[in-house]
Image (cartoon, rainbow, N blue to C red):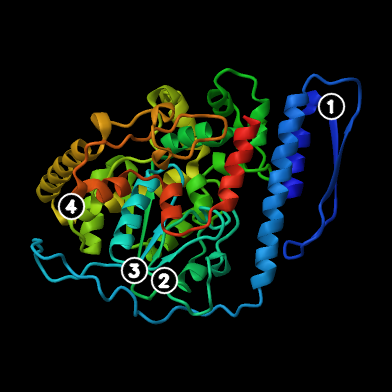
């Protein structure tokens, strides 16, 4: 990772006339000291702030690399065994007074593959609340809010993991590895994920991550995204640091090669393989219908799927995609577009099987219940900008150098019987993880450093 970052810095800050050297050709599984030095070639430079920022980025990346390697080396002696016993979640019961047709029991063994920029944080809040309510056992990361993404997922990344240990719910950001995930969950676990139209996902990802992708720093145009889409190969490099955020991010999240061209046979092979693993693939553009299908699949109640939107952006930060830009974005993210089209078709097949009229009634009821909770919990009834959030417990994580993510203020006059429910529904991911006992020191260090830089 260090070599890639330095390469990105050297390639994309030529205006500062810096020559960078990195020593060491360490194999991935060996921890060695990374030595670097930066030499100014000519004159006094006017880009001191840029150099300082690059240095801090590089320093932080190396700290995280060292910590990850130490953790892996300390745990590579573990003999990882498959979780084979379905002994968890036996206390899940249908609440008294609920109406449930047919015979089913609530599902508590769940793998949620949390994809980026797909409304997955809203689903995460639903899962956190359900697991907390029923005292289910989460497989959580250690020190941060993801499983050392973008590294491929390993069981050893789970906090306190012991070989053969079973968990109920696995739901934090990861780079999916099917065999490793299966070692943690009972055989009857339900696998769920969510997708979003790749053009809109690309726009959101570009906005959120471009400051963390060095090759975008040299795009001089006012509309960086439009300039990139016009000639992506002028800027993009397969090996560039964090480049995966800006091409076929869904494919990458699923542990696949995000640089495959759509006509490559491996793309459809990978899609069909995913369809054999995931029981339900939700679609962000049809979020309410997705939740109804989730409720049906997991035998949950409407109360279990009530939600407030999390990590939504303020409208002024959203770039309007012209038809031409949308076409270019879909072409650039061709593998993701094929993935989305395939599972969009399976999604609507499930809606048809569920019943269109029945779905319409359920969506109306979900909207009614959500509106009730908004009136009960949210001051003003709507999300607000980060600067106007009164309580830091409800302040969502922001993109590097920005304050575009909306959050909520909780009403001060809430009836005592609703207070806990409202607090949990309003709590963003980072704070909820802390409430559930996850040590987030590395995530907080990252936040402190990025705040210091920007």
Give the distance between the C-alpha atoms of the residues marked 1 and 3, in whole angstroms.
55 Å
Image-based side of 276 in relation to 178, left or right: left
The residue that disc 1 covers is: 17
Quadrant of the frame with the C terminus: top right
User: Is 323 drawn above or below residue 368 in the view shown?
Assistant: above
Does the CB distance between marks 2 and 3 fall below 8 Å?
A: no
Instruction: Residue 109: give its label.
Output: 3
Residue nearest the viewer, comparing 306 with 377 = 377
x, y percent for residue 248: 51, 44
| SS at circle 3 | loop
| SS at circle 4 | helix
Q: In front of the other: label 1 or label 3?
A: 3
Residue nearest the viewer, comparing 26 with 56 = 56
Mark closest to the chain's N terminus, 2 or 1: 1
Mark closest to the chain's N terminus, 1 or 3: 1
Image-based side of 392 in relation to 43, left or right: left
x, y percent for residue 19: 86, 34
Mark closest to the chain's N terminus, 2 or 3: 3
Q: Residue at x 39, y 58 (%)?
A: 112
Instruction: Residue 352: give its label.
Output: 4
Give the distance between the C-alpha atoms of the residues marked 2 and 1, in whole angstroms.
52 Å
Does the CB distance between marks 1 and 3 fall below 8 Å?
A: no
Mark closest to the chain's N terminus, 3 or 4: 3
Classify mark 2: residues with Cα within 10 Å, few (<14), some (14-19) or many (20+): many
| SS at circle 2 | loop
Occupied quadrant, residue 243: top right
Classify mark 3: residues with Cα within 10 Å, few (<14), some (14-19) or many (20+): many
Q: In front of the other: label 2 or label 4?
A: 2
The residue that disc 2 covers is: 167
């Amino acid at each position: 990772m260090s070599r890639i970052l330095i390469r990105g810095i050297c390639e994309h800050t030529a205006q500062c006339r810096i020559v960078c050297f990195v020593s060491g050709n360490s194999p991935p599984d060996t921890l060695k000291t990374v030595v670097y030095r930066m030499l100014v070639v000519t004159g006094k430079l006017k880009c001191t702030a840029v150099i300082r920022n690059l240095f801090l980025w590089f320093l932080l990346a190396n700290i995280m690399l060292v910590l990850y390697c130490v953790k892996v080396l300390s745990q590579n002696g573990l003999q990882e065994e498959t979780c084979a016993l379905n002994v968890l979640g036996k206390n899940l019961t249908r609440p008294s007074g609920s109406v449930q047709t047919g015979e089913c029991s609530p599902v508590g063994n769940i793998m949620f593959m949390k994809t980026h920029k797909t409304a997955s944080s809203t689903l995460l809040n639903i899962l956190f609340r359900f697991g907390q309510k029923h005292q289910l056992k989460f497989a959580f990361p250690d020190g941060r809010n993801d499983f050392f993404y973008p590294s491929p997922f390993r069981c050893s990344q789970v906090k306190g993991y012991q070989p053969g240990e079973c968990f109920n719910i696995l739901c934090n950001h990861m780079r999916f590895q099917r065999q490793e995930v299966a070692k943690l969950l009972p055989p009857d676990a339900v696998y769920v994920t969510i997708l979003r139209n790749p053009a809109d996902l690309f726009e959101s990802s570009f906005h959120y991550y471009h400051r963390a992708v060095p090759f975008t720093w040299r795009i001089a145009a006012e509309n960086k995204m439009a300039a990139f889409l016009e000639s992506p190969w002028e800027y993009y490099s397969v090996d560039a640091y964090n480049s995966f955020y800006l091409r076929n991010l869904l494919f990458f999240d699923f542990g696949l090669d995000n640089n495959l061209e759509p006509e490559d046979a491996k793309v459809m092979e990978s899609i069909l393989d995913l369809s054999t693993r995931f029981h339900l693939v939700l679609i962000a553009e049809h979020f309410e219908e997705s939740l109804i299908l989730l409720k049906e699949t997991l035998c949950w109640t409407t109360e279990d799927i009530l939600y407030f939107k999390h990590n939504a952006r303020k409208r002024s930060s959203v770039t309007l995609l012209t038809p031409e830009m949308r076409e270019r974005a879909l072409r650039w993210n061709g593998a993701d577009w094929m993935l989305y089209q395939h599972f969009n078709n399976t999604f609507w097949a499930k809606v048809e099987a569920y019943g269109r009229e029945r779905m319409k009634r359920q969506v109306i009821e979900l909207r009614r219940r959500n509106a009730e909770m908004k009136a009960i919990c949210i001051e003003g009834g709507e999300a607000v900008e980060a600067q106007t959030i009164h309580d830091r417990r409800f302040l969502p994580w922001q993109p590097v150098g920005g304050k575009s993510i909306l959050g909520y203020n909780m009403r001060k006059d809430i009836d005592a019987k609703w207070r806990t429910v409202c607090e949990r529904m309003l709590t963003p991911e980072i704070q909820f993880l802390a409430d559930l006992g996850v040590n987030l020191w590395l995530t907080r260090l990252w936040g402190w450093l990025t705040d210091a830089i920007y």
